[in-house]
Amino acid sequence: MAQADLNERAKNLTKENIVKIDTEINLTDDEKATYPDFSNAYYLEHFTIVQKYKTDNPELFKEKVIENNNIFIAKLKKAYGNKRANEILKARRSK
């Protein structure tokens, strides 16, 4: 996939996440402004990991996905605090 397509895909997934999270816990204006930076970076890294490792090295793929998830969570916790970050993550996973 071209980088522009990946960027667009990351932005679309982030927009979907914001809508889903906001319906669950009502994000503040500040959270709505800053969350896309964290989410877009997370998705772009995830897409890169998939392209590089998924078929060639499944074990490293799993490690890299976990590492990327942990980085994303750490950034949210640093920006919003543990409690609010956990609320956001829980709302993000809801159906």
Image (cartoon, grey):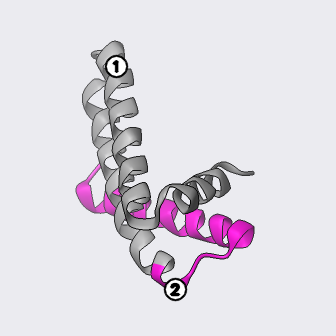
Residue 63 seen anywhere in this rendered image of the structure: yes
Question: Which mark is first along the chain, 2 or 1?
Answer: 2
- Across and down, in percent, residue 74 comes to 37, 49
| 32 vs 87, nearest the viewer | 87
Distance CA(mark 1)–CA(mark 2): 40 Å
Q: Name the residue under label 2.
A: 29
- Identify whether 24 is placed above or below 73: below
Q: In this rendering, which labeled residue sits more in front, label 1 or label 2?
A: 2
- Across and down, in percent, residue 14 comes to 49, 64
| 12 vs 42, nearest the viewer | 42
The residue depicted at 37 percent of the width and 59 percent of the height is 78
The region drawn magenta spans 1-30
Is 20 placed left or right of 11 in the picture?
right
The residue depicted at 32 percent of the width and 57 percent of the height is 41
- Identify whether 74 is placed above or below 8: above
Helix, strand or loop at mark 1: loop
View extreme (bottom): residue:
29
Is 43 placed left or right of 45 in the picture?
right
The residue depicted at 69 percent of the width and 69 percent of the height is 25
**Crowd around label 2: few <14 · some 14–19 · many ≥20 (10 Å):** few
Residue 64 lies in the magenta-colored region = no
Q: Mark 1 points at which residue?
A: 55
Label 2 sits on what residue type?
Asp
Is 59 placed left or right of 77 in the picture?
left
